[in-house]
Amino acid sequence: MKALPALGCFLLFFCFFLYKAIPTSALSDNEASYIARRQLLALPENGDLPDGFEYTVKTTETFKNERLRRAFIALQAWKKAMYSDPLNITRNWFGSNVCSYKGVFCAPALDDPNLTVVAGIDLNHADIAGYLPVELGLMTDLALIHLNSNRFCGIIPKSFSRLNLMYEFDISNNRFVGPFPEVVMTWTTIKYLDIRYNNFEGCLPPEIFEKELDALFLNNNRFTCSIPETIGTSLVSVVTFANNKFKGCIPRSIGKMGRLNEILFMNNDLGGCFPPEIGLLANVTIFDVSFNSFTGSLPQNISSLKSIDILDISHNKLTGAVPENLCKLPSLSNFTFSHNYFTEEPKGCVSPERNTIVLDDSGNCVAGRLNQKLNNECQSVVSNPVDCSKDQCAVGPLPSKPNPPKAPVRAPPMPKPQPKPSPDPIYQSPPSPIRPPAPIVPSPSPSVPSPSPIPVQSPPPTSPPIQSPPLVPVRSPPPPVLSPPPVPVHSPPPLPVQSPPPITVHSLPPVPVQSPPPVPVHSPPPPVQSPPPPVHSPPPVPVQSSPPVPVHSPPPVPLPSPPLIPVQSPPPVHSPPPPVKLAPPPKVDIVLPPNIGFQYSSPPPPMFPGY
């Protein structure tokens, strides 16, 4: 009878040993690459499921509701994507009763308690090798996924953005790759995110710290870049950045993290001085910044960490003195400041008041203490101390010089459409006597829609010879008149000009112009920046004049009209009437606008030294 308990203990020990002896091997890089390629080949074109995909899959089983049928489609696709299941976890994954599958948990739907749905999947420590198929996005009632310590590879599919009820997502200790899984940013109810011990890389999206997370585990990946300033808005109680490649400073906004209890920065490429805002973390119990490149002295207000239990600042380049009251904090049990360049250590750290405090000051430059650095090694750093009052990590970046305000640019009004000018038009003179062409002065201002034919700026007429019109009263202002573009003119010899009889023009404002005596006609003069107001006038009358200038004169005086004189013009060339060539408006550049001290439902990976 006494042998039975001993036999039972032996059998229990044998079973335990047999369980531990089950061979499990990590995936090689080639195997992981193969699985990832298989996933990419199975992904739809956009990486997501098409709408109504579940209706394209035929099933012969009977289900209590449509959501269980969709879960069946997803789980069967996942089983096909598993390449190794050494513990035979999925041996009962068949049939319509998906709630009986091992690792699958059902519950009443949140939106309809009368419906039973798949609410959680827990395959922690199953050692399954495979990938996550897009069909898993069909299980929209999932609130919990625990895949800790498996051999899943590849990426997190975009279809996971359909899992709007996700609350706990643990994929730690696998072989996932790619950037930070952006599908997380679509989950509004996520509270626990654990993606540590994978191969994620790149930068962290700043928005992740705006989620209402309670725990965020990012350690042991390949993240780079700096830690976003938005960390100050985070509500997390635990966050780990350890064992990545983060660089830059600890954001000064860290002092706003009122709920923070544990934070790990160890083993990164962080540097600079500590921001004084660290002293505002009154609820922090674990603070680890070891194995980085921090410089300067410790801020004096670091002694304000009243709740600190474990403080590790070892393996940096810190100098100066350890604050007097730091070793006297009431909750402190372990303070490691070894392998720095401290030159002074207070008595409270040399002989602590409590025997329960563990202190490590080795590898520093404190005179009279054991296990310190050599003098020449200390001198190279101590002789060049860092002034943290000028360090950007401690006081913030220098303000950038404001750019000088730019003058507002107003777009000119668009001119009315003009006919496209023909290349090199040739002026055709009428065969009968005409008046010589007048100099052409195009309007350079883009604000005037088009130059009007008034007795100063009119181009040569394109119609047959016109006799001097009788006196015609004109009422103004009418709409602007489109005029033909200027054309190249072969200058004839100087001739007298036939001036029209006086014309009474009512304009706003009246601009009477007196024509000067005739002068020889040369090439068109350069544009003059004095566009006249648009007026309505009789058919254009050529006037030979000098470049227009503003003239203040009495009311219009009749001009004598000399007799018409025949003009020898170039031989006629048969060409269409020349279109108008308006001076192009000037171009205007318009400026258009480790989870330590907390218990969670998902067990973390095995503890490692320094984690």
Image (cartoon, rainbow, N blue to C red):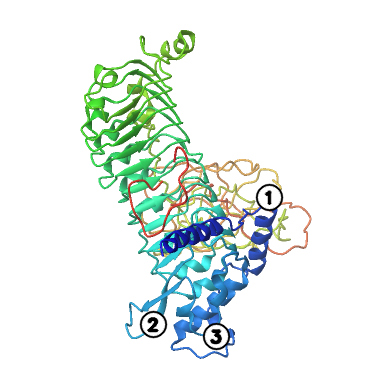
The residue most toward the front is 1
Pointer 1: what residue? 488
If you read the primary sequence from the N terminus, does the residue marked by circle 1 or circle 2 appear first? 2
- Left or right of residue 216, residue 202 in this image: right
What type is the residue that disc 3 sits on?
A: Tyr
Describe the element under mark 2 as helix, strand or loop: strand
Whether residue 603 is visible, yes or no, is yes
Describe the element under mark 1 as helix, strand or loop: loop
Measuring 54% from the left and 59% from the top, which residue is drawn there?
Answer: 19
Task: Count up the numbered dots.
Answer: 3
374 shown above or below 200: above
Pointer 3: what residue? 55
Q: In the rendered image, which quarter is residue 547 located in?
A: top right
What type is the residue that disc 1 sits on?
A: Pro
Measuring 39% from the left and 82% from the top, which residue is drawn there?
Answer: 116
Q: Which labelled disc corresponds to residue 116?
A: 2
